[in-house]
Amino acid sequence: MSDQSARAVADLESGVILATVAIAAAPERVFRALTTDEIVKWWGADRLYRTTGWTADLRVGGAWRAEGKGADGAHFSVGGEYLEVEPPHKLVQTWKPDWDAGHTTILTYRLEETPEGTRVAIRHEGFAGRPDSCRAHGSGWERVLGWLTGYVSPARGHYFFCRLLPPRPSFAMDMTPEERAVMTEHGAYWRDQMSRGHVAVFGPVGDPLGPWGLGIIRVADEEAARAFAAKDPAVLSGRGLRYEILPMIQAVTPDSAA
């Protein structure tokens, strides 16, 4: 596929979110992941929240409900009713989360079969007059589609070793306040990309010659890996931080080793 990253656009004025992703899996496989208790296996990340329970009566007029637990230990739930059910290509349902003052919106999934798998398109509407909620749900859908892709198509993409080289060997020990602020933004960027399913692991390495940063990412190709690095606040800061990027010849993961 030419573009496998999940993308979402939130129109704050109209209150509509559009999101899409291309997945290397059949529509039937994707539809099952969206409508059964498989959801508890993939919807969430430890640093944000986890879905822990799912029930659904998959028919027009049937109810669905998901429950979960946030990283702070707080419980949440979201539920609704199915308005249209056309497996495996279309699903329309109401969306009523307990964290959004019980406001009800309409969520539509469309699954289009492609030569490579499935194009998933989401339309989430009903946020007019609620720009903060619209914006938050827009960001959330990018993460969710990333989790979905990683679950139904875990072999998607290639792994790359990313080494972040500091401007001086003592950088980790004698950062200025400005440099420390940049590295805080750098960490937030990598955590966000991890929540979207692009990062396997990252962190500083205690090299005797001077610490440096390590990250393993999974993206479509080397061009995407370099684009990933170029958007890092550490690189954008212009303070001399730079990446060495090498493709992994073979990556052994829990999925591939099973």
Image (tube, helix red, strand yellow):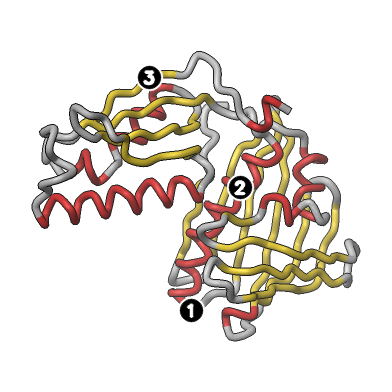
Left or right of 90 in this view: 157: left
Left or right of 236 in this view: 217: right
Which image quadrant is residue 237 in? top left
Chain-order first, disc 3 or disc 2: 2
Q: Which residue is mark 3?
A: 246
Dot 1: what SS?
Answer: loop
The disc placed on residue 130 is 1
Disc 3 from disc 2: Cα separation: 25 Å
Disc 1 from disc 3: Cα separation: 44 Å
Q: Which residue is mark 2?
A: 147
Is the Cβ of the residue at disc 3 closer than 8 Å to that at disc 2? no
Q: Amino acid at mark 3?
A: Leu
- Along the line of sight, which residue is nearer the eye, 89 or 21? 21
Q: Amino acid at mark 1?
A: Arg
Please name which of the two marks, 1 or 3, marks the residue nearer to the observer: 3
- Quarter of the image with the N terminus is top right
- Quarter of the image with the C terminus is top right
Q: Amino acid at mark 2?
A: Trp
> In the rendered image of this protein, does residue 66 appear above or below residue 215?
below
Dot 2: what SS?
Answer: helix
- Along the line of sight, which residue is nearer the eye, 73 or 65? 73
Residue 257 in picture, x, y percent from top left? 69, 25
Which residue is rendered at x = 35% and y = 53% of the image? 188
Which residue is rendered at x = 52% and y = 61% of the image? 48
Q: Residues within 10 Å of mark 2 (few under 14, many from 20)?
A: many
> In the rendered image of this protein, does residue 89 appear above or below residue 97?
above
Residue 253 in picture, x, y percent from top left? 61, 29
Please name which of the two marks, 2 or 1, marks the residue nearer to the observer: 2
Which residue is rendered at x = 59% and y = 76% of the image? 74
Left or right of 216 in this view: 256: right
> In the rendered image of this protein, does residue 52 appear above or below residue 244?
below
